[in-house]
Amino acid sequence: MNTINHDTHLINLRNIDDLCCLALLFAGGGIAGWIYEMLFYRINDGMFVQRGQGLGPWLPIYGFGSVFICLIAEYFRRSKVLVFLVSALVSGVLEYLTGWTLFHLFDGLRLWDYNTEIWNWGNIGGYICLRSILLFAFAGVFLTFIALPVVQDMADRIPRRVFRIICLVPAALFLVDILGGYILRIW
């Protein structure tokens, strides 16, 4: 059994098991984002719309957002309000910069456009809106106070090799699918 010391910080980037926790949260965040978008676009468009560029049920920006939120929000975890605000800021900056970069550096590519969606209050250039920022802020509180501690508890309770397989297999499949989608798009 493992015993990870989380007295000072939730995540130690030098600890392989903490990196495995982040890998699982990366895959889980990507899957949760895919489910959210499938449901949202079912409401918005009246039908299911395939989201993402890969074959699997995951979206990279949600995976990366989950990891960034976990890494930054840990410094504010003494206050749920601060975690909420930091999560909103982190996800808003990530979403805006990603959307802007894709549009301006990749020939007008838009993977999302809040200009054309319902509930798009506070829309800035179609890249971010208040609905998405609030949802991601609540997700950050969930990640920080529920998901990450559950995964870390799992690391303490099961054999190290089993834990690493549980974490790394979904993350590896996710990454292979992302890279495969980009390679196929280039060809």
Image (tube, grey):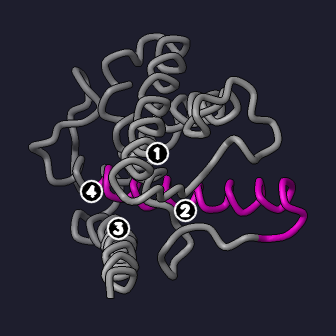
Amino acid type at mark 3: Ala
Q: Which residue is mark 3?
A: 171
Instruction: Verify whether residue 45 appears in magenta.
Output: yes
The Cα–Cα distance between marks 3 and 1, rounded to whole angstroms, is 23 Å
Q: Which residues are magenta?
A: 20-48
Q: Position of residue 90 (x, y in %)?
A: 42, 28
Q: Residues within 10 Å of mark 4 (few under 14, many from 20)?
A: many
In the image, which disc is placed on residue 99? 1
The Cα–Cα distance between marks 1 and 4, rounded to whole angstroms, is 28 Å
Comparing marks 3 and 1, which lies closer to the viewer?
Answer: 1
Q: Give the secondary structure at mark 2.
A: helix
Name above or below for residue 6 compared with residue 18: above
Q: Residues within 10 Å of mark 2 (few under 14, many from 20)?
A: many
Q: Position of residue 87 (x, y in %)?
A: 48, 26
Q: Which residue is mark 2?
A: 31
In the image, which disc is placed on residue 20? 4
Please tell me which residue lies in front, 70 or 185: 185
